[in-house]
């Protein structure tokens, strides 16, 4: 699903705040484990991952565990937002920290966009 540019900026900002004040897991393996252990509260997946198979299971797993997720355009930007110097394919936010309200706003907007479909 294509999300508006303003929402993408909010997602990166939420990841940045959560990485500083909460707890995030970086990378597909860590994200998968966080979802399977039901620790993830919000999942962010990079859309420019190649091959796509690397992250294809994450939306399904997120839906199965009833965890909100979003796809952003750039793994480089996602890595930067998470406070690491390398691109990352996905991130699981375990503790939102100061990003709690922002993440709630993002999830609400995503639900609205899904209803419009």
Image (cartoon, rainbow, N blue to C red):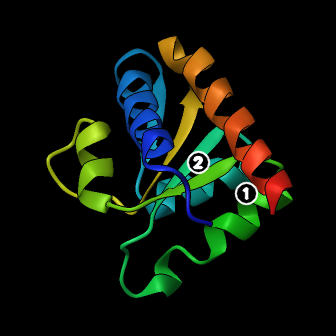
User: On screen, 12 above or below 62?
Assistant: above
Which residue lies at the image location 50% right of the left edge and 41% below the top edge? 7
Q: Nearer the viewer, residue 9 or 27?
A: 9
Looking at the picture, how far across and down is residue 53, in whole percent? Answer: 52, 86
How many marks the image carries: the answer is 2
Q: Quadrant of the C terminus?
A: bottom right
Q: Nearer the viewer, residue 56 or 35?
A: 56
Indicate the secondary structure of the residue bearing disc 1.
helix
Which residue lies at the image location 44% right of the left edge and 45% below the top edge? 8
Which residue lies at the image location 38% right of the left edge and 30% below the top edge? 13
Please state if 16 lies on the left or on the right of 25 as rendered: left
Q: Are marks 2 and 1 in contact (CB under 8 Å)?
A: yes
Residue 105, quarter of the rendered image: top right
Q: Which residue is mark 1?
A: 62
Q: Quadrant of the N terminus?
A: bottom right
Q: Which residue is mark 2?
A: 43
Within-10-Å neighbours for mark 2: few <14, some 14–19, many 20+: many
Indicate the secondary structure of the residue bearing disc 2.
strand
User: On screen, 108 above or below 101?
Assistant: below
Residue at the farthest left position:
85
Looking at the picture, how far across and down is residue 65, in whole percent? Answer: 82, 53
Please state if 91 lies on the left or on the right of 38 as rendered: left
Q: Nearer the viewer, residue 46 or 65?
A: 46
Give residue 107's mark: none
Kindly report the distance in space between the C-alpha atoms of the residues bearing marks 2 and 1: 8 Å
Looking at the picture, how far across and down is residue 18, in whole percent? Answer: 44, 25
Of mark 2 and mark 1, the one earlier in the sequence is 2
Asked if residue 41 shows in the view, the reply is no
Which residue lies at the image location 18% right of the left edge and 55% below the top edge? 86
Asked if residue 53 shows in the view, the reply is yes
Within-10-Å neighbours for mark 1: few <14, some 14–19, many 20+: many
């Amino acid at each position: 699903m294509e999300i508006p540019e303003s929402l993408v900026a909010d997602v990166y900002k939420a990841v940045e705040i959560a990485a500083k004040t909460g707890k995030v897991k970086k990378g597909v393996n860590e994200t998968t484990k966080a979802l399977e252990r039901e620790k993830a509260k919000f999942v962010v997946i990079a859309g420019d991952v190649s091959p796509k198979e690397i992250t294809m299971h994450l939306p399904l797993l997120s839906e199965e565990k009833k965890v909100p997720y979003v796809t952003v355009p750039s793994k480089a930007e996602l890595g930067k937002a998470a406070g690491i110097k390398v691109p990352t394919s996905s991130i699981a936010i375990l503790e939102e920290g100061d990003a709690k309200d922002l993440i709630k706003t993002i999830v609400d907007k995503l639900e609205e966009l899904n209803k419009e479909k």
